[in-house]
Amino acid sequence: GAVVSQHPSRVICKSGTSVKIECRSLDFQATTMFWYRQFPKKSLMLMATSNEGSKATYEQGVEKDKFLINHASLTLSTLTVTSAHPEDSSFYICSGDSVHNEQFFGPGTRLTVL
Amino acid sequence: SQKIEQNSEALNIQEGKTATLTCNYTNYSPAYLQWYRQDPGRGPVFLLLIRENEKEKRKERLKVTFDTTLKQSLFHITASQPADSATYLCALETGANNLFFGTGTRLTVIP
């Protein structure tokens, strides 16, 4: 199947700083990329959907000014958590979709805000 | 609002038996439903997609059924192996390829 990478895999930061997470589709072009958040023992919750070259669509309750998403190309999307706080600590996962409606997920990024 | 329930948070079965996981949903009529496997600390891995007009889908030891009248999908792993131990997530398509995930069932296959 198609491969999606995320960088970094783990990040620890101080409260108030910003963190950027990269999501790349390595062997396919993802017109649409999705960002999810997963808390321990909970399911993935969709945060936003991004299409290449346009603004992201955010789910209800997700602050677009706090979670900045940029989808600069068909193979790269970035999520920036601005002014991170401890409650933002979570597992962030991106995915890109294929023409067959399958979504290919990245390995996730574990964010810990101290 | 949409609601997805996966039958149990955890399921333990003996190696060689068939594991059956259930996904029930309300308040929606998805065009398709997907099943994913997730290992601890990793992103989900796609397993199977079944469309609303399909009753059953198979892939090797995996079988998925989709009953749109009951609003239920069953996920079976036959001849289960310890390596099948993982969390299995069902996900509904909610339009524009967006997926809404269940909370998952953590399967443990006991040797």
Image (tube, coloured by chain):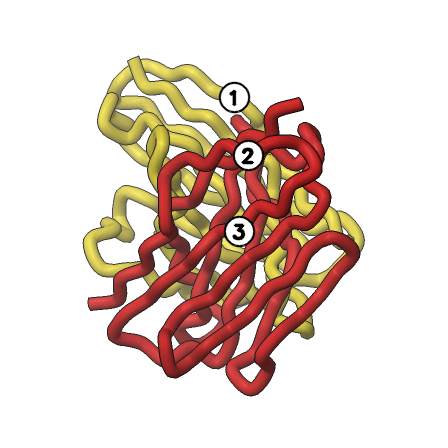
Mark 2 belongs to chain = B
Q: Regarding mark 3 in the picture, which secondary structure is present there? A: strand
Q: How many marks?
A: 3
Task: Read off the residue under disc 2.
Answer: B13
Residue A10 has which mark?
Answer: 1
Residue B34 visible in the current orientation: yes
Mark 3 belongs to chain = B
- Find the distance from the CA under tag 2 to the CA under tag 3: 10 Å
Residue type, mark 3 in image: Thr
Q: Nearer the viewer, residue A68 or A46?
A: A46
Quarter of the image for the C terminus of chain A: give it: top left
Chain A: what color? yellow
Q: Nearer the viewer, residue B10 or B4?
A: B10
The quadrant holding residue B3 is: bottom left
Residue A48, given in percent of the width and then of the height, sits at: 38, 57
Task: Read off the residue under disc 3.
Answer: B20
Question: Residue at coordinates 33% horizontally, 66% vertically from top-left?
Answer: B25
| Label 3 neighbour load within 10 Å: few <14, some 14-19, many 20+ | some
Residue type, mark 1 in image: Arg
- Find the distance from the CA under tag 1 to the CA under tag 3: 34 Å
Residue type, mark 2 in image: Ile
Q: Is there CB contact under 8 Å for labels 2 and 1?
A: no
The quadrant holding residue A12 is: top left
Question: Residue at coordinates 45% horizontally, 70% vertically from top-left?
Answer: B93
Residue A13, given in percent of the width and then of the height, sits at: 38, 16
Depth-wise, is mark 1 or mark 3 nearer the camera?
A: 3
Residue B23 has which mark?
Answer: none
